[in-house]
Image (tube, grey):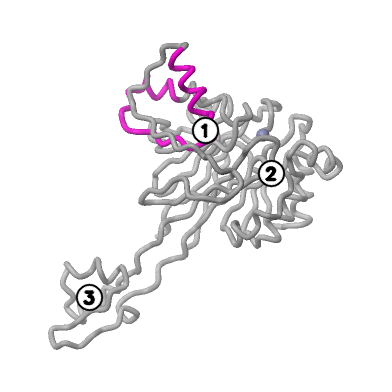
Amino acid sequence: MSQVFDLLILGSNSAKPAYDRHPTAQLLNVQHRLYLVDCGEGTQMRLAENGVKSSKIDAIFISHLHGDHFLGLLPLLDSFNLMGRQHPLHLIGPPDLIKIIDLHKEVCKARFLYPIHFIPIKDTENAGRVYEDEMISVDTIPMDHRVPCTGFLFREQPKERNILKAKIEEYQIPFQQIKAIKKGADFECESGEIIPNAELTLAPKPRRAYAYCSDTAYFEAIIPQIQAVDLLYHESTYLEDMTHLAAERGHATAKEAARIAFKAQAKKLLIGHFSSRYADLSGFEKEARDVFPNSFLALEGKTFNINNS
Ligand SMILES: [Zn+2]
C-alpha cells in the first residue's frame, strides 16, 4: 500500500492576487505530517477552504522575503495562538524573518503560547540541510533571484527493508530480531546457520523526493541537486516572449522551467508563480509541454500525488 506523499497547491500567483489566483503557498503532506512551503497573503484562508486543519502543520519553510511568499505568515502564527496551539512549530527561512516576528511581538504585544523553533538559512549560495524529522529531510536549493532565496528539496527518510512473512515462519524468527533484520541484519538460526538478509527481505521502495524551486531565473547550477526528482515545482512567471524581462527580474519562463525539468530528468513538472498580467494560463502549459511533456499547471486547490507504488 502506498504511503501518502501529496502536494496541495494553495496559491500559485506572483506578486499580487489576480483572476482568483493567490500568492504562493503549498502544503506537503507526508504520511499526514504537514509542511507548509511559503506563505503568501491569505494562506490561512486557502488552508480553510481546502479543509486543512492548519494547527497540524509541523514546519513552515519560507524561501525568501518578497511579500508574495511570506505576508500570510503573521496572521497564521496569530491564529495558531487563538486555536490554543501548544506544540512547537519549526520555522525555516531567511535570518531576517525572525526580526519581523519579533517586531510584531513587540509592537502588537503578540504573545505566542507555543514555541517557535526558528532555523535561519544563513547560506543561500550552497545547498545545505536545514530540517529533518522521522519522515523527511529538507535541503536548501540555491536560487538565482534578486534577493537571497532558496528552494527546498524534500526527501523521504530511508525506509526499512520489507521482511517476508513466509521466512519468519520458515526460520522461526523471534519477534525481537525482526527490527534488526528490517535494517539489514542477517539471521542466525539455532543450528548456527546464517541466513543472509537478502533471502529474508525485499528492498524498500525508492525514497520519493519533491523539489520546490521558487523564485529563480533560469539557473542550470541546480540541475545536479534535483536530478531525477519525482516531482519538480519550478516557477514560470512569464511566457517565452518575456524571456528578457524574466531574466532581468530574476524569474523564469515556462519554457525555461521545462528545460530545467528535462535536463534534470525530473519525472513530473509543475509550473506556477504566474504573473498577474496573464488571465489565461493555457500558454504556460503549452510552452512547457513543447519541451517537457509531463508538465502541469500548479492550479490552486489541486493535489498532486507522488506515488511510487
Ligand atoms: Zn521573489
301 left or right of 187 in image: right
Amino acid type, mark 1: Pro
Q: Nearer the viewer, residue 45 or 115?
A: 115
**Real-space CA distance between mark 2 and mark 3, rounded to the nearest whole angstrom:** 53 Å
Q: Which residue is mark 1?
A: 95
* Helix, strand or loop status at disc 2: loop
Q: Which residue is mark 2?
A: 144
* Helix, strand or loop status at disc 3: helix
Location of residue 174 in the rendering, given as x and y in whole percent from the top left corner:
16, 72
Q: Which residue is mark 3?
A: 168
Residue 102 vs 93, above or below: the answer is above
Amino acid type, mark 3: Ile
Location of residue 268 in the rendering, given as x and y in whole percent from the top left corner:
62, 56
Location of residue 197 in the rendering, given as x and y in whole percent from the top left corner:
31, 78
242 left or right of 233 in image: right
Residue that sits furthest to the left in the current view: 190
